[in-house]
Amino acid sequence: MRALIFDLDGTLIDTVYAHVFAWQRALDEANMAIDGWRIHRRIGMSGGLFTRALARELGRDISTEEAEELRRRHGELFLELLPRRRPLPGAVELISFLRSNSILFGIATSGRRPEINASLDVLGIGNETVVVERGDVARAKPEPDLFLACQQRLGVGVDDCYVIGDAVWDLLAARRAGMLSIGLLSGGYGEDELSRAGAFRVYRDPAELYRSLDELGVLP
Amino acid sequence: MRALIFDLDGTLIDTVYAHVFAWQRALDEANMAIDGWRIHRRIGMSGGLFTRALARELGRDISTEEAEELRRRHGELFLELLPRRRPLPGAVELISFLRSNSILFGIATSGRRPEINASLDVLGIGNETVVVERGDVARAKPEPDLFLACQQRLGVGVDDCYVIGDAVWDLLAARRAGMLSIGLLSGGYGEDELSRAGAFRVYRDPAELYRSLDELGVLP
């Protein structure tokens, strides 16, 4: 039995640019201006790594309290900027197809509850679906913990899992978990960045992935 | 005599993600939701092409009035979201180096006055510099008009111009103008996208370009 493990932001929901802009504003307010593209390429990595990367760019330490305040302010701005979540094209149809065809799938996200609840709601994902979030594991992407926890809860082997993600961090974490991975352009990375990070296929968005399920070897 | 022709947004000023998000909001308000990454990859192309691309994605026509209202609302949201312009790392130093070493340079942007004035101000670019903006030419990028107008005002040959831009549209317009081009990652494109569009070098941002001027053959 094959199983699909999905990232959430940028893979099923169109939230990446709102996240980038909310970070840019939160950092600017704290007098820690960082280029937009550098934030973009770090969305989806663990908060600890993100903070360390920031500190390196700024050339100074960021205290735990500062990091916590930045996270809080980012969350606040994100909700203000994007009150309504929008599924990416094909995401709802893909999820519903997997469900009606009894193809195993789960969600593994660096996001946290309750922030991710609105996204799960618009996708029609309820308690029947395995959802692993940041709070469930010790270490976030590019560590493999989120994907391994999801695989274990799905009750399948590592070899039978396909990770679908939009960020280099998803693809690196998949490789470290020993899983195959598929990249989506819907998070704003270039095709080549995703291929080089290990994706064996790259599609534009969930709609193109849905139309291409035959290319993956996951259909029963 | 060699000359450098710079794009503005995403090349010298950190505005791309604010533009993407302002478009996303303006379109969403008009019930024309479009994925963030699709907007991102169209920043810097001519407004007419942008509107046509939107219409194709939405599967319906967009009237001239609708397009005009979208542009107006985008401009309003952009100023609201990003009241303060921030030069990209190295941009101010690079401009000042070119000036003190009498290396010819100009700006050629799909943006318009008065919107671009704040960006030119923080870069220290005044009336002494050749600035070609959208209103000065009939057709915007990827047509070559902006770069050709800049080259003519600089009084150098097409062969002696190097275009520096962050978007595929800059690099395509440069090729059509018969000019060499250099890509910058600071607009959020991947390196490979820029190389394939014709950039013979790709740098991270103006700071890395500044440190690498010797690799370009433009220094006297």
Image (cartoon, coloured by chain):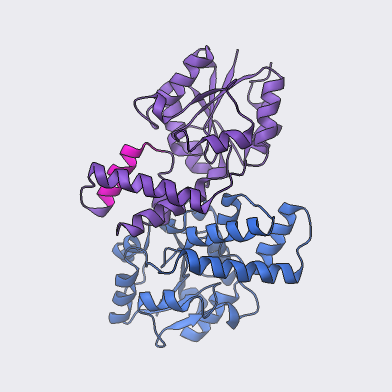
Chain colours: A blue, B purple
| Relative height, residue A198 to residue B200 (above, below) | below
In the picture, residue A31 is in which quadrant? Answer: bottom right
Q: Quadrant of the C terminus of chain A?
A: bottom left
Percent x, y for residue A79?
49, 69
Dominant SS type (magenta): helix
Range drawn in magenta: B45-57
In the picture, residue A24 is in which quadrant? Answer: bottom right
Q: Residue furthest right?
A: A60
Residue drawn where x is 53% and y is 34% of the image: B117
Residue drawn where x is 43% and y is 39% of the image: B44
Residue B54 lies within the magenta run: yes
Q: Is residue B13 left or right of residue A209?
A: right
Viewer-closest of B133 and B141: B133
Viewer-closest of A80 and B154: A80
Percent x, y for residue B9?
52, 39
Viewer-closest of A40 and B106: B106
Question: Would you say residue A42 is visible in this rendering?
Answer: no
Percent x, y for residue B141?
40, 32
